[in-house]
Image (spheres, rainbow, N blue to C red):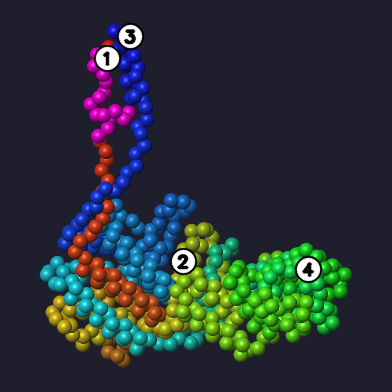
Amino acid sequence: MLVMQRAMFAAGRRIANRPAPLTRAYATHKQLTFGADARTQLARGVDRLSRAVAVTLGPKGRHVLIDQSYGSPKITKDGVTVAKAITFENRIEQVGARLVQDVANKTNEVAGDGTTTATVLAKGFFNEGNKHVSAGCNPVELRKGVMQAISKVEKFLKEKSKVITTSDEIAQVATISANGDAAVGKLIAQAMEKVGKEGVITVQEGKTIDDELVITEGMRFDRGYLSPYFITDAKTQKIEFEKPYVLLCERKISVVNDIVPALEVAVTERRPLLIIAEDLEGEALAACILNKMRGQVQVAAVKAPGFGDNRKATLHDMAILTGGEVFTEDLDMKLTDLKAAHLGRVDSCTITKDDTVFLNGQGDKESIQERCDQLRQAIADTTSSYEKEKLQERLAKLSGGVAVIRVGGSSEVEVGEKNDRFVDALNATRAAVEEGVVPGGGVALLKASSVLSDVKGANFDQQLGVQLVAKALTLPTRTIVDNAGESGAYVVGKLLDHHSSDQEFNMGYDASAGKYVNMIDSGIVDPTKVVRSALVDAAGVSSLLTTSECVITDAPEKDSKETGAGGMPAGMGGMGGMGDY
């Protein structure tokens, strides 16, 4: 009997020490929240997120410090970056916050800036709408009134928009978007002046303390020489050609007979030859190197940039720029039939191991302009952001140049913060060039609220929607002044009471200097596209939030307490008769 008890005890202990089986949790049900309770929790999420974002608004706005799971904490004044970093434990609050994040993201995608203004407006629209719905207003009619008012304000902003043309005006827009940093505005204005309004301007993290502007004129692409034997300047490790011929080929060249006609033309005309093809290999590459080493002809070879259809399109761009032709299988053109007229021409060419730059292609100006117009139309028609980016790069290479702003700083955190401001300022500048500017500091929206007195809703609830918009439009100015340590309500009241006429439309409050000024003359401007996008996006999402009567979320997970230690059912701490062992 004793032996049996010991055996049972040993078996029980093995069971107790056995690891609990792995289980997979599935969401089995949802949680439904209705009416005022749902809207209250949504409002709490919207309010908490908006407060975090709103502290960054204006010239005296504060920074937000964001803890990250990797690397150093991030310091930023970029509204959309702050919004993306926020998550809440309460699922309904998270739904409200997520919708406001979507407002900021949409504004950022369309205009590239104005995310903080959009967030502040979204909070104002939703909170005011929530009050009216709680008091018994029909939310659907309320939304109709809101959208009617937004349409009126949008039209008003377009009428008051001022076209910008000079470099100083561009610098003003960039400076305001960069929270008053004049150095940022000046650098972006210089870049836009150099490469034109359609030129490509990119922002990169630099490796020095100071900010740098690097301009590349002409056509540049990121492919270097195929062999170091082609180098003409041993000291700088570059190939530099003056007035070279350019051979453009869509396929690989490996047979020496294919390049002999081009080499003969170069020798006859005593001009350098640049070969741009999918690849140059085998005896064709060896023949080029041999001719270069013997000094019989200056020749170099570079791989064509891009892949697939993009490579084909880029080669045709080069052909138009240089006045040459692309040897392609589609047209059944053979390299053995090459004549001098098939080769492109440029004034100069510089090739390093990483990139190639053409200056002053000899192509027909009308053909180049026609190609640029085709690319502009393609940019307008495409819906893919990737395609749009590639088309803009091609347009810039044909029409202007490329500018790279290298952001400097003494630490990674500082460079990251400045980089955010440079990107915002660049996007704002592009938006301003596209649709013009209006007085900044929230003044355009504040003054627009006065035109809503003429808007009449079809019923009482719609009229409440119009009044709701008029009240929410004062929030950006109020927030900017509050962040500067002044009384936002007092400044808003004074601007509406004393400076609301058409003649004083540009009058506003300079929060950085603490005085009332003409905003346009003082250079405090906002791009019309940014203000308009922020307004429309905020109103659309917030008014829909107001009409919500039910919120469906995943039910909160409950901790399972049905198993005891060791995976044994609760209450089975031991086995009878084994108390002495």
Q: Where's residue 496, x and y in %?
A: 25, 83
Residue 64 vs residue 199: left or right? Answer: left
The earlier-in-sequence mark between 2 and 1 is 2
Label 4: few (<14), some (14–19) or many (≥20) C-alpha neighbours in 10 Å: some
**Residue labelled with disc 3:** 3
Front position among marks 4 and 2: 4
Label 1: few (<14), some (14–19) or many (≥20) C-alpha neighbours in 10 Å: few
Where on the picture, by quarter, is residue 275?
bottom right
Distance in Å between CA atoms under marks 2 and 3: 76 Å
**Residue labelled with disc 1:** 578
The amino acid sitting under disc 4 is: Val
The magenta stretch spans which residues?
562-577
Q: Where's residue 315, x and y in %?
A: 64, 76
Distance in Å between CA atoms under marks 4 and 1: 91 Å
Front position among marks 3 and 4: 4
Element carrying mark 1: loop
Q: Is residue 341 magenta?
A: no
Asked whether the residues under the numbered discs 2 and 3 touch, taking CB atoms below 8 Å apart as contact, a structural biologist would say no
Distance in Å between CA atoms under marks 1 and 3: 12 Å
Front position among marks 4 and 1: 4
**Residue labelled with disc 4:** 255
Label 3: few (<14), some (14–19) or many (≥20) C-alpha neighbours in 10 Å: few
Q: Residue at x 18, y 76 (%)?
A: 141
**Residue labelled with disc 2:** 420
Residue 232 vs residue 472: left or right? Answer: right
Where on the picture, by quarter, is residue 104?
bottom left
Residue 261 vs residue 553: left or right? Answer: right
The earlier-in-sequence mark between 4 and 1 is 4
267 lies above or below 68: below
Q: Residue at x 47, y 80 (%)?
A: 380
Front position among marks 1 and 3: 3
